[in-house]
Amino acid sequence: MTATTAAETTAKRRSLTAAASEYIDERTSVSVVVKEFGRKIFPDHWSFLLGEVALYSFIVILITGTFLTFFFQASQADVIYHGSWVPLKGIQMSAAMNSTLNISFDVRGGLLVRQIHHWAALLFVASIGLHMLRIFFTGAFRKPRELNWVIGFTLFVLAMAEGFTGYSLPDDLLSGNGLRIIDGLIKGIPVVGTWISFLLFGGEFPGTSIVGRLYTLHILLLPALVVAFIALHLVFVVVHKHTQYAGPGRTQQNVVGYPVLPVYAAKAGGFFFIVFGVLALMASLFTINPIWLYGPYDPSPVSAGTQPDWYIGFADGMLRLMPSHWEFVWLDHTWSLNVFIPVVILVLFLVVVAIYPFIESWVTGDKREHHILDRPRNQATRTAIGAAGVTFYAVMWAAASSDLVATHFKLTMEGVIGALQVLLILGPIIAYFITKRICIGLQKKDRSIALHGYESGRIVKLPGGEFIEVHQPLDEYERWRLVSYETYQPLMLRPDSRGRITFGRRLRAGMSRWFFEDRLEPVTKGELEAGHDHH
Amino acid sequence: MRETTHKIARRRKTGRRHPFATVALIAIGLGLTGGAYAAFNATGSTADAAASSQSDIDAGKKLFQANCASCHGLEAQGTSEAPSLIGVGAAAVDFQVGTGRMPMAMQGPQAQEKPSQFTQDQIDQLAAYVASLAPGPGIPDSKYTDGDGDAAKGAELFRVNCAMCHNVAGAGGALTEGKYAPPLHGVSPTHVYEAMVTGPQNMPVFNDKNISPEGKRDIITYLRFIQQNPSPGGFELGALGPVAEGLFIWIFGLGSIVALTVWITAKSN
């Protein structure tokens, strides 16, 4: 009896599910999508999850940000604070500051949500940065993914813009100081600077409209752009298929990993809650942006230790590193090159980052698709360029905290700035050469291990009296990782179809020589066999 | 009591923020209230006595000649090494000697705080001697240092006058050529008041026309408030602002996330 009941129930249940799915499918044809997308394979490696961290932080930002908009007033109208924080009671401030304080002290859970929102914003940009470094150093930006690199780069810039507009909204002392620097940067642009500044702030700084305008950007335009670019970014990931590291059975044509359904969907879904959990834990334990200490914005005071959030730090640092007297009067106008040149350097730096995939493909002349990732050591010049770029960025970043470095390490501020000015130029050069040599050294080590195996430490005395160390050969799987990469030979300088050698061709040949002059060819089959015979 | 206060202050200064910041804050708060009360009662009476007691002045002079005269001169007239102390008043002595800045451990960009080398009685005698040389700012009355003023007004005055160097949270900041504005946590209210009226090291003088005694009392009230009330948002990360937050998100935030990604993608054995 029990058996029949059970069978009947199962049949009934199955039919319910079946009926429901059939109902939906007949009306939406969703099975096509599920069939296609559910079978999508993603390879498993921790570094492939960094972009996901960025995505999940963004979702957390959207959720918490929506909550904050319920209580935030984007207005610079004067009000008197009457909330719970005693040291600001009776102080005149803008409605924006007042409402942010009320979120912090008088809205239930408001401070926690505000802190999750801010920590998530910091994590959002940080994870984008780390994700970009992973893409760069493994060569995942090569054909066919150059455009997706540019989309990702745009997301990085949008994230910084989101962060900065958000940082400026509470209208506290720190954010007002930050806006003043932006105002200065804009005014430093020759000819049009003052016009743009007046347009943006609706008159002379600070005016009464900037918070409202930034709010519109922060919650409407920029998030819409971020969502659109994320969608585009992910569509390309699906279209291109995911890259993978070299390994046995992994080719340019396949992807080895788990399907989205059920494995990856579950893993990724769980990972979202992990990221959310880490952010919530951090926000519940650690203060971020204590605006109640900063107080309302007032153009006269500037606190010691005033810094932007970390992702704008490199811009602040570049300003601090600039020698201060590059300013002159010409045609009755002041030309503030001490402010304009840092802006130009920052823009150039970002442009180089954005177009790097095109530069490299032009230098290599490689038009093939690449789905297998490089080990950073096997592309010594690219890795060295990356290290130089990271050093350049890091020096600018460190310069933004020059005052704290000075007090905490008991140095003089002038000494810190001077040293960083020198490092800004020399650091990337030193980093380039050191990294390149380390990469080539590692390649040599790989080559020797592939050819001769590991040193086993076992010394054997041969009958003839000779001592040798027995080398332990690699297994096939490990060797695959070491030998399956490709190098480029420097391009030859050849005349074009019209028989001319143009400047472009010369430049390209020169760049190619610079990229690939120092290289180790991968171990060939012949060499491997010879190596085996040897032992 | 004052000794304990200084010890805590010194440890906090060198060790920056500690996980037990909240506990320490409460301890400092309690220590300050009690310590200040005891100290002000004592200083109040000695200040009165200083005018009359020649024995204090004589004892102070002996201490001065033994400990200070090699730089400041036998009659406190100043030398090429150190300025004249005629007219600096008892407040300057109480601050400089009471916080251990004087006698100076070494020549440097500025005198550094260290444990005081003298007992409060000896400091009072020194102060009485220096005050006897010429009129100058005296030890503040305890009604200005009780910390019961208007915290909101004090916070505003602090942001406008003090935060440029000392940071809005009183965490300190850098000045030029290796000089610095020290953190204000754990500094006794009397010393804060004395610093404002005498302008030690590189600090400007905030006289009574600049900030009224009531205004100074409000500032002290604000400083006491932020020391006694832990940050509503949790641990403060040194109250250093975005730099500390940025380092935290990269090292601990992203660090833990990367560790978790490794865990998620690890192959099960």
Image: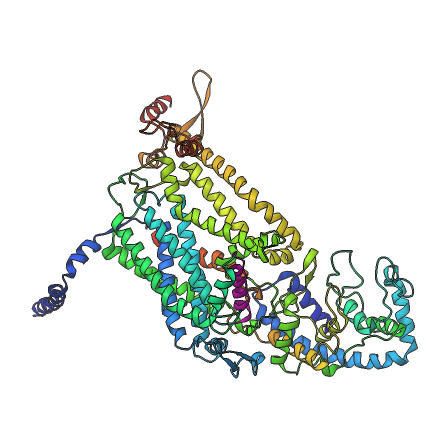
Q: Is A507 colored magenta in this rendering?
A: no
Query: In front here: B208 or A30?
Result: B208
- Quarter of the rendering containing residue B89: bottom right
Image position, residue B10 (x, y; %) = 68, 64
- Residue A522 image point, x, y percent: 36, 30
User: What residue occupies the far top of the structure in this picture?
Assistant: A464
Residue B209: in sight, yes or no?
Answer: yes
Residue that appears at 52% across and 50% down? A394
Q: A467 or A67, which lies in front?
A: A67
Left or right: where does residue B262 sit relative to residue A322? left
Of residue A255 and residue B194, the one placed in the foreground of this image is: B194
On whether residue A177 falls in the magenta region, the answer is yes
> In the drawing, does residue A526 fall left or right of residue A393?
left
The quarter of the displayed image where residue B98 is located: bottom right
Magenta-drawn stretch, dominant element (helix, strand or loop): helix
Question: What kind of colouring is applied to the model shown?
Answer: rainbow
A262 up-or-down from B149: above or below: above
Magenta residue span: A172-190
Res A454 visible: no
Q: Position of residue A384 (x, y in %)?
A: 46, 40
Q: Nearer the viewer, residue A494 or A461?
A: A494
A281 versus A403 height, above or below: below
Quarter the N terminus of chain B occupies: bottom right
